[in-house]
Image (cartoon, rainbow, N blue to C red):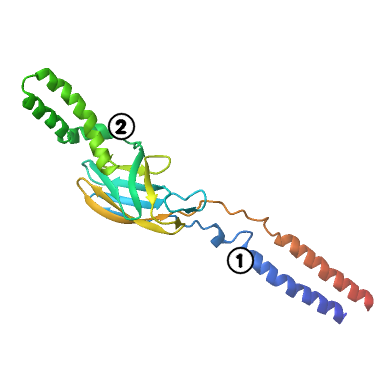
């Protein structure tokens, strides 16, 4: 009889820690379900706020020297007036090239009209050239057409990037939005490594921020959850068998 009592006591002691573990941890721990923030560096200059400045994660897992990298960031204009990103420069690459127009550009041309009045510097050159030509006013009407084509070209050629950021709005740079490529990396880069980029805005001025290579966004596959209740049942049946065997032995 004493043997049966001892066996039952040992079974209870074995079940106790397992039950406590099941209550405290459950099938999935809280730390396992926590979302890690994947946020890049942020900087502000004037009314312009740069958020989540990153380089797109490369398909091969690393950038080789000489390759191009896509720049990712959100440019937030917290002011009322429109500002314009004039250039993106840095020592870790040859040049920055705008490969796709900004998605929020539709409002930008309207807001850019005032800038157009400033940019009609081409128009100014057009008005001066007719005055210079003086003889043909119709040429004046023809020449304004040509400056309008040359003006954006000179703006783009000198900087490689020219993006209008309307007031109280956000322009996103990334593969699915406005695409800016940093052409000709000067050294290999892997996840976590980065390079300094300097952005110059017409009104806000100049700001330098580190753009790091993003980490891959892959879901980690989890195994099947451990069934503690099944384990408890097996442990309980084992203890009962031990107790029964001990009783029969007596």
Q: Is residue 223 above or below residue 170?
A: below
Q: Secondary structure at mark 2?
A: loop
x and y, in percent, of residue 67 in the image:
43, 49
Front of the two marks 2 and 1:
2
Q: In the shown orientation, is residue 246 left or right of residue 25?
A: right
Residue at the image position 25 percent from the left and 44 percent from the top: 86
Residue at the image position 6 percent from the left and 26 percent from the top: 131
Quadrant of the drawing holding the N terminus: bottom right
x and y, in percent, of residue 102 in the image:
34, 37
Q: Residue furthest right?
A: 249
Q: In the shown orientation, is residue 206 left or right of residue 72?
A: left
x and y, in percent, of residue 126 in the image:
13, 28
Q: Which of the two labelled residues, at mark 2 and mark 1, occupies the earlier sequence position?
A: 1
Residue at the image position 22 percent from the left and 31 percent from the top: 150
Dividing the picture into quadrants, the one containing residue 80 is top left
- Is any part of residue 46 visible from this angle? no
Residue at the image position 26 percent from the left and 54 percent from the top: 207
Q: Which of the two residues, 11 or 99, is positioned nearer the viewer here?
A: 99
x and y, in percent, of residue 129 in the image:
10, 28
Q: In the shown orientation, is residue 229 left or right of residue 102?
A: right
Q: Is residue 134 above or below residue 212?
A: above
Q: Is residue 179 above or below residue 133?
A: below
- Is any part of residue 146 visible from this angle? yes
Instruction: State the residue position of label 2.
Output: 106
Q: Residues within 10 Å of mark 1 (few under 14, many from 20)?
A: few
Instruction: State the residue position of label 1.
Output: 24
Q: CA distance from mark 2 to mark 1?
A: 55 Å
Quadrant of the drawing holding the C terminus: bottom right
């Amino acid at each position: 009889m004493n043997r049966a009592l001892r066996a039952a006591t040992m079974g209870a002691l074995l079940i106790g820690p397992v039950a406590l573990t099941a209550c405290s941890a459950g099938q999935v721990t809280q730390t396992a379900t926590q979302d890690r923030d994947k946020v890049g560096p942020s900087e502000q200059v004037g009314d312009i706020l740069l958020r989540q400045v990153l380089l797109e994660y490369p398909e091969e897992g690393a950038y080789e020297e000489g390759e191009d990298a896509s720049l990712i960031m959100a440019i937030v204009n917290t002011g009322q007036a429109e500002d314009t990103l004039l250039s993106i420069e840095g020592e870790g690459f040859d040049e920055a090239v705008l490969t796709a127009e900004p998605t929020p550009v539709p409002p930008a041309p309207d807001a850019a009209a005032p800038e157009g009045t400033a940019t009609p510097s081409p128009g100014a050159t057009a008005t001066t050239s007719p005055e210079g030509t003086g003889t043909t006013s119709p040429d004046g009407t023809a020449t304004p057409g040509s400056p309008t084509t040359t003006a954006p070209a000179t703006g783009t050629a000198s900087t490689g990037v020219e993006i209008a950021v309307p007031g109280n709005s956000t322009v996103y740079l990334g593969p699915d939005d406005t695409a800016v490529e940093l052409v000709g990396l000067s050294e290999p880069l892997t996840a976590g490594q980065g390079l300094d980029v300097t952005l110059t805005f017409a009104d806000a001025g100049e700001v330098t921020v580190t753009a790091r290579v993003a980490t891959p966004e892959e879901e980690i596959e989890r195994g099947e959850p451990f069934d503690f209740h099944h384990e408890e049942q097996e442990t309980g049946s084992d203890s009962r068998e031990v107790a029964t065997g001990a009783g029969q032995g007596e």
